[in-house]
Every structure is written in C-alpha cells, then in structure tokens.
Image (cartoon, rainbow, N blue to C red):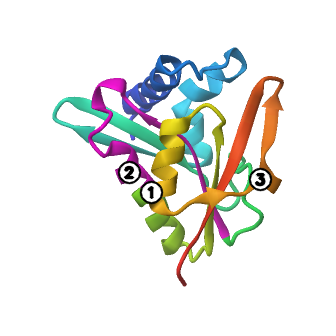
C-alpha cells in the first residue's frame, strides 16, 4: 500500500475506535500508525466506490504485533475496524474471513484474538464465525482496559 493509503487506514482505525469510545489515550498512536503495522505485520483494507470501508492487522509468525498466539501454529489478528458509515454491510465479516484464509495458507491450526470487553458487536461477529472464549488468556494492557481472548480451531 502507498503511504497515503496507510495514512488513511490508520485514520479509519482510529476513527472507528473513537466513534465507539474505545480509543484509550495510551492506544491512539498505535491505532493510527498503520505504516508501522504494515512493516511489522500485514495491514489489509476493504474499499469500495465510496472509499475505505474497513481495516484489519494480521499478525503472522515473527510479528511483534502478536499478543496471544502461542506459537507459529496460531494465527492472530487485531485492530479490526469498520468505518461507522459502512457498518452493517458485511465489511467486518469480509475482513475476518480474509484473516482465516491467511491462517490456513500459513498452515496454522488455530486463530486467536483479543477484544475489549465492551466491544459486544465484535463479539457477536466472532461468535458467528465460531470463535469461543479463552478466559485463561484474558488480560489487561493498562488499568481499566480489559481484553477478552477468543480462539477458533481451523480444519487441517
């Protein structure tokens, strides 16, 4: 992606998290910095005739963006964001599907992710894909931010 596209992806991510009240001040720089995420992981976007609609960061083995993945057999993604105006159009599902495809391409046996306790719409999306809670992996990066872990076994 071009530098301008990465800037737009970072702005979309920050905007989506901010719209829902999830842009903790300690997290704003990481949300908006899609260029670094693209260098150290894989940033994917969904775009349409009306512009950028969604963005996700896929964290392959070796990426410093991995938080929950136990080893190379786990896929992981984070920072799934859909533009507020594009919600309800299947953009989030499209991006999750792409993350699952990428994990299968890499031969991974499971996909993991963490999500803020308050992100109930995202939790419903993950449940539709068959993700289940992994409470033993729940964690808190900063006081007041509680992250719930989810996992989905992949067919071999």
Measured along the vertical axis of the image, is residue 115 above or below residue 27?
below
Q: Earlier in the sequence, mark 3 or mark 2?
A: 2
Looking at the rendered structure, the secondary structure element under dot 1 is helix
Residue labelled with disc 1: 128
Looking at the rendered structure, the secondary structure element under dot 3 is helix
Return the x and y of residue 151 as percentages of the image width and height. Answer: 64, 61
Q: Residue at x 47, y 18 (%)?
A: 19
Which span of residues is magenta-colored?
74-96
Residue labelled with disc 2: 93
Return the x and y of residue 100 as percentages of the image width and height. Answer: 48, 64
The N terminus sits in image quarter: top left
Q: Residue 92 magenta-drawn?
A: yes
- The residues tagged by marks 1 and 2 sit, at their Cα atoms, a distance apart of 9 Å
Local crowd at mark 2 within 10 Å, few (<14), some, or many (≥20)? Answer: some
Q: Residue 46 magenta-drawn?
A: no
Measured along the vertical axis of the image, is residue 15 above or below residue 150?
above
Q: Name the image quarter holding residue 106.
A: bottom right
Measured along the vertical axis of the image, is residue 11 above or below residue 153?
above
Of 132 and 43, nearer the camera is 132
Q: Name the image quarter holding residue 51.
A: top left
Residue labelled with disc 3: 135
Measured along the vertical axis of the image, is residue 87 above or below residue 143?
below
Q: Residue at x 77, y 63 (%)?
A: 70
Q: Earlier in the sequence, mark 1 or mark 2?
A: 2
Q: Earlier in the sequence, mark 3 or mark 1?
A: 1
Q: Tell me, yes or no, whether the two marked residues, 1 and 2, touch with CB atoms within 8 Å.
A: yes
Q: Nearer the viewer, mark 3 or mark 2?
A: 3
Q: Residue at x 31, y 34 (%)?
A: 53
Looking at the rendered structure, the secondary structure element under dot 2 is helix
């Amino acid at each position: 992606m071009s530098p301008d596209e990465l800037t737009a992806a970072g702005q979309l991510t920050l905007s989506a998290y901010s719209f829902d009240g999830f842009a903790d001040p300690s997290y704003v720089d990481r949300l908006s910095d899609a260029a670094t995420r693209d260098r150290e992981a894989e940033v994917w976007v969904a775009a349409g005739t009306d512009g950028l609609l969604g963005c996700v960061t896929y964290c392959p083995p070796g990426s410093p963006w991995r938080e929950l993945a136990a080893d190379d057999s786990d896929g992981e993604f984070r920072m799934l964001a859909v533009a507020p105006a594009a919600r309800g159009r299947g953009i989030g599902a499209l991006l999750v599907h792409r993350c699952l495809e990428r994990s299968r391409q890499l031969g991974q046996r499971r996909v993991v992710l963490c999500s803020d306790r308050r992100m109930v719409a995202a939790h419903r999306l993950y449940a539709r894909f068959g993700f289940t809670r992994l409470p033993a992996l729940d964690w808190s990066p900063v006081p007041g931010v509680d992250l719930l872990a989810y996992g989905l076994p992949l067919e071999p």
